[in-house]
Image (tube, helix red, strand yellow):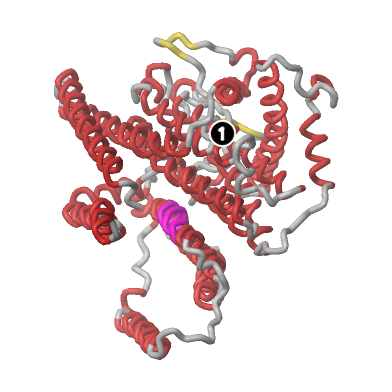
């Protein structure tokens, strides 16, 4: 029993199988078309921010530009370097691409969450959830897939049989592995507050604005998650993985034609899925905005698609924010990137997680929440200053003795 | 159904394991290891241990083998090895002895505890429904957490201490000798 979908409880008929197949197909097609539109959206918005026109030839507003680029890449010659390890070279793009797709399976894309319902809707006379699978480990699957995605990048650089892609891939995978820890730690706060790992359960728990994990975990985990997700996606300002202007490409230097297109597709699809994950974890996914019992109800207009409309609206906000980041922020230096990950994000998210846990225990034991908060903050400040002191000592030693490693 | 899953996952595990020892290329060996780990994760899911499966993929496939690959790539040992050269003469016979010994141990253990494998007497449907209904969505994780943080909390904490000791030990071992000191001794040796 992988997921608790009401569709799969009891006997499985042909209709159930067809519905599951339909869901797979819809997610696949929407994923691909969404990625295509995302590339266009990013180019268009960025050109708007930089006072230029952007793609405007292919189709209305240049919306078919990505399709044209895709077709061009398909028909280009497929090169495999002489020194390449052929099998791994061919395998790597798929290792990058498949995890990007699989994350969609656990994101609730819509459904009826009003009045504490668990998002089940009726589709062709069968009760089901608008998500492909709802495994009990939901969020952990996300972490597992993002750790698998490292393989694609790492092996791509190595198998190219050239120094520069290898350096690029070591740089990229070091970045991704480091930020995965911060990603997991900032996620832990959400799990603590909602009390479940299942993505469906996390959405169900966020029934009003004050219960959105954004508010319930105290905003900081969201910032941590956004920063580490951006680094995990290799998006600007953390795009040292590619850094077109100043480094030799990166892990994908030797790739051309359709294999390159797969990496490109995976990257943009990851941007969309990660935005979807942020919306699910912190902004209530398909839940409507509801403050103090006043719900912004759009269900008379959209009927059963209300949840999906909310999800897409929230998703668009984050896609725009990612493009905005790219247009605004300058790229970090590599040592700054590592310092931010290890010395800021990980300790702060760990500390904040402890504080949340302390509040939770205080709630269970009936302690005064102000006392818990003040003691918690004093302990955190003490631990933080100790850490800063340790950093300062090690920096001084480094200055005096030179780099140790 | 369970048998089909078991056969496919078992084939993955054994195929991967064979790949680890047969392939002559270290990177291919590491990838075969990933295949084995995935097979084990599938077996965990088939046994309803989803949490273990996820942790297996995150920790072993996502972190440890990535570390292996890092070391293989950075140390530049990513060349196919000639398997006919034997660096230590006694290594292979010793490996054969140890391997046969372990297989023997596992088989003996399986035979002596054969009775443990017989299926439990069937519970009447009503009782089964009463004990498993309602199936809590994440019962698996709750149970594991309760075990780890109540009955086995001491062992758990000791393990984390062990890991910290290992990290500190590695840092100390990997540290180069004090460079400031090395420079002064060099300066003393250098002709004036």
* Picture coordinates of residue A153, whole percent (x, y): 58, 50
* Picture coordinates of residue B130, whole percent (x, y): 34, 49
Q: Nearer the viewer, residue A5 or A23?
A: A23
Farthest residue, direction front: B192
* Picture coordinates of residue A90, whole percent (x, y): 68, 58
- Is B162 on the left-hand or right-hand side of A5? left
Q: Which residue is mark 1?
A: A235
* Picture coordinates of residue B140, whole percent (x, y): 36, 50
In the figure, residue A197 lies in which quadrant? top left
B19 inside magenta stretch: no
| Number of marks in the rendered image | 1
Q: Residue at x 46, y 42 (%)?
A: A138
- Is A127 on the left-hand or right-hand side of A397? right
In the figure, residue A364 lies in which quadrant? top left
- Is B84 on the left-hand or right-hand side of A180? right
B59 inside magenta stretch: yes
Q: Residue at x 80, y 24 (%)?
A: A62
Q: Nearer the viewer, residue A199 or B91?
A: B91
Q: Residue at x 67, y 29 (%)?
A: A38
Magenta segment boundaries in residue numbering = B56-68
Label 1: how many Cα within 10 Å (few below 14, some 14–19, many 20+): many
The answer to whether residue A129 shows anywhere in this view is no
Q: Chain of mark 1?
A: A
B176 w.r.t. A45: above or below: below
The answer to whether residue A71 shows anywhere in this view is yes
Tell me which secondary structure the magenta stretch mostly adopts. Answer: helix
Q: Residue at x 29, y 38 (%)?
A: A395
Q: The residue tagged with tag 1: helix, strand or loop?
A: loop
In the figure, residue A127 lies in which quadrant? top right
């Amino acid at each position: 029993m992988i997921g608790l979908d009401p569709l799969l409880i009891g006997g499985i008929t042909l209709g159930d199988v067809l519905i599951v197949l339909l869901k797979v197909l819809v997610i696949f097609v929407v994923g691909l078309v969404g990625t295509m539109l995302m590339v266009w959206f990013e180019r268009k918005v960025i050109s708007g921010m930089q006072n230029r026109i952007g793609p405007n030839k292919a189709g209305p507003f240049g919306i078919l530009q990505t399709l044209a680029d895709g077709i061009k890449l398909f028909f280009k010659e497929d090169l495999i370097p002489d020194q390449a390890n052929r099998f791994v070279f061919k395998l790597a793009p798929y290792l990058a691409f498949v995890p990007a797709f699989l994350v969609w399976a656990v994101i609730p894309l819509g459904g009826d969450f009003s009045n504490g319902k668990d998002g089940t809707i009726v589709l062709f006379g069968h009760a089901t959830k608008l998500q492909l699978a709802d495994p009990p480990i939901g969020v952990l699957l996300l972490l597992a897939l993002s750790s698998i995605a490292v393989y694609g990048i790492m092996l791509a650089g190595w198998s190219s049989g050239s120094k520069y892609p290898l350096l690029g891939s070591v740089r990229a995978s070091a970045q991704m592995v480091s930020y995965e820890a911060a990603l997991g730690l900032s996620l832990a706060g959400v799990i603590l507050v909602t009390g479940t790992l299942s993505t469906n359960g996390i959405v169900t728990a966020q029934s009003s604005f004050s219960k959105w994990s954004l508010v319930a975990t105290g905003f900081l985990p969201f910032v941590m998650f956004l920063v580490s997700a951006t680094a995990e996606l290799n998006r600007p300002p953390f795009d040292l993985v590619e850094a077109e202007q100043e480094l030799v490409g990166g892990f994908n230097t030797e790739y051309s034609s359709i294999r390159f297109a797969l990496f490109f597709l995976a990257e943009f699809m990851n941007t969309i899925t990660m935005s979807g994950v942020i919306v699910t974890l912190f902004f209530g996914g398909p839940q409507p905005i509801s403050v103090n019992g006043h719900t912004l109800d759009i269900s008379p207009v959209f009927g059963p698609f209300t949840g999906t409309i909310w999800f897409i609206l929230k998703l668009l906000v984050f896609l725009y924010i990612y493009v905005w980041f790219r247009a605004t922020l300058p790229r970090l230096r590599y040592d700054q990137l590592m310092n931010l990950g290890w010395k800021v994000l990980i300790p702060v998210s760990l500390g904040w997680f402890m504080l949340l846990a302390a509040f939770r225990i205080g709630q269970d034991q009936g302690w005064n929440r102000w006392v818990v908060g003040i003691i918690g903050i004093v302990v955190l400040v003490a631990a933080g200053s100790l850490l800063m002191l340790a950093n300062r000592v090690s920096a001084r030693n480094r200055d005096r003795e030179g780099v140790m490693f | 159904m369970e048998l089909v899953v078991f056969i496919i996952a078992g084939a993955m595990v054994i195929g991967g394991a064979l790949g680890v020892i047969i392939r002559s290329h270290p990177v291919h060996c590491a990838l075969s290891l990933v295949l084995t780990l995935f097979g084990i994760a599938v077996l965990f899911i088939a046994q309803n241990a989803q949490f273990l499966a996820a942790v297996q993929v995150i920790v072993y496939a996502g972190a440890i083998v990535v570390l292996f690959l890092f070391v293989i790539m950075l140390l530049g040992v990513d060349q196919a090895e000639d398997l006919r050269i034997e660096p230590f003469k006694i290594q292979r016979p010793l490996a054969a002895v140890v391997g046969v010994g372990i297989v023997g141990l596992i088989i003996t253990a399986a035979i002596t505890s054969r009775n443990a494998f017989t299926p439990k007497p069937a519970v009447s449907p009503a009782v089964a429904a009463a004990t498993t209904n309602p199936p809590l969505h994440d019962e698996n994780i709750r149970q594991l957490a309760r075990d780890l943080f109540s009955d086995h909390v001491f062992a758990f904490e000791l393990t984390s201490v062990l890991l910290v000791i290992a990290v500190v030990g590695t840092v100390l071992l990997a540290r180069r000798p004090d460079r400031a000191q090395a420079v002064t001794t060099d300066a003393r040796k250098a002709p004036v």
